[in-house]
Amino acid sequence: MTRHRLGLASTVLAACLLVACGGSGGNAPQQGSAPFVVNADGSSSFVDTALSAALAAQPLESLSAAERTSLAYMREEEKLAHDVYARLNTLWGGQTPIFGNIARSEATHTEAVRLLLVRYSLPDPAANLGEGLFVAPVLQQGYHDLTAQGAISLIDGLRVGATIEEIDIVDLENALPTIDNQDIRQVYASLLKGSRNHLRAFVQALAQQGVTYAPAYLAGDAYTAIVTSAVER
């Protein structure tokens, strides 16, 4: 999530929010040989052992400065999604399983980026940081803003989830053209699929509450193409 966009996210959330999807609560990732799996409710997760094997099969290439910066930021950006959803699950988990299910998926997303940092012997900005703590100031502020907005009501929490996934999609789409290492591209492509699936889930959950979500970051046609298409497997 770029610094500019996250700053805008807080402003848009404040403006928009002022004016249930999911299966069972125990929605663990399906185990198997695929490094990335999608559950019936759309929550999309990495399988650690399969991902490690898939990464090992890719060449270890030199890293550009853009790739180093992107990996460090993406590690914390995925942690942000997990930590916000985990917090919202403590507030609204009794009414919907969506926050808990997607928080579990996001835990595997940030771990997948951590595996890339380890693979390239890069420092982990999220090492030893507890829930809600971040190195990047914009993400630290974002956590406070997003959890505050999501605490207003269940509908506000679902809107926060959709907004996070929108921004993640935009950031991943912007990052991919700057990355040529195949292992990073493989993980980012799966993260992008996961964010599209999670956006679908939050939008559907809002619809079940009688609310139509209006995108703030994706172009209208791109957003419509995502939410009107089936969950990606």
Image: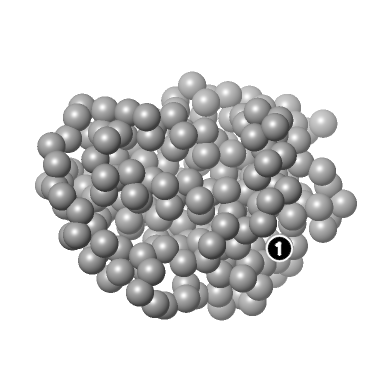
Report the front residue among 34 and 156. 34
**Percent of width and height locating residue 127:** 25, 51
Viewer can see residue 99: no
Q: Which secondary structure lies at badge 1?
A: loop
Left or right: 5 with respect to 62? Answer: right
Q: Residue at x 51, y 53 (%)?
A: 194
Q: Which residue type does callout 1 highlight?
A: Cys
Residue 85 in picture, x, y percent from top left? 55, 55
> Which residue is found at the position 81% from the left and 52% from the top?
207
Residue 232: give x, y in percent of width and height: 57, 57
Q: Quadrant of residue 12?
A: top right
Residue that sits furthest to the right in the current view: 210
Question: In the displayed structure, does residue 74 sit left or right of residue 62?
Answer: right
Q: How is the image coloured?
A: one colour
Q: Is 146 left or right of 77, judged from the image as shown?
A: right
- Tell me: residue 61, above or below residue 36: above
Q: In which quarter of the image is residue 69?
A: top left
Residue 223 in sight: yes
Q: Quadrant location of the C terminus?
A: bottom right
Q: Is residue 34 above or below residue 150?
A: below
Question: Circle 1 is placed at which residue position?
Answer: 21
Residue at screen point 26% across, 45% down: 182
Mark 1 neighbour density, 10 Å: few (under 14) some (14–19) many (20 or more): many
**Residue at position x 52%, y 66% from top?**
38
- 142 up-or-down from 112: above or below: above
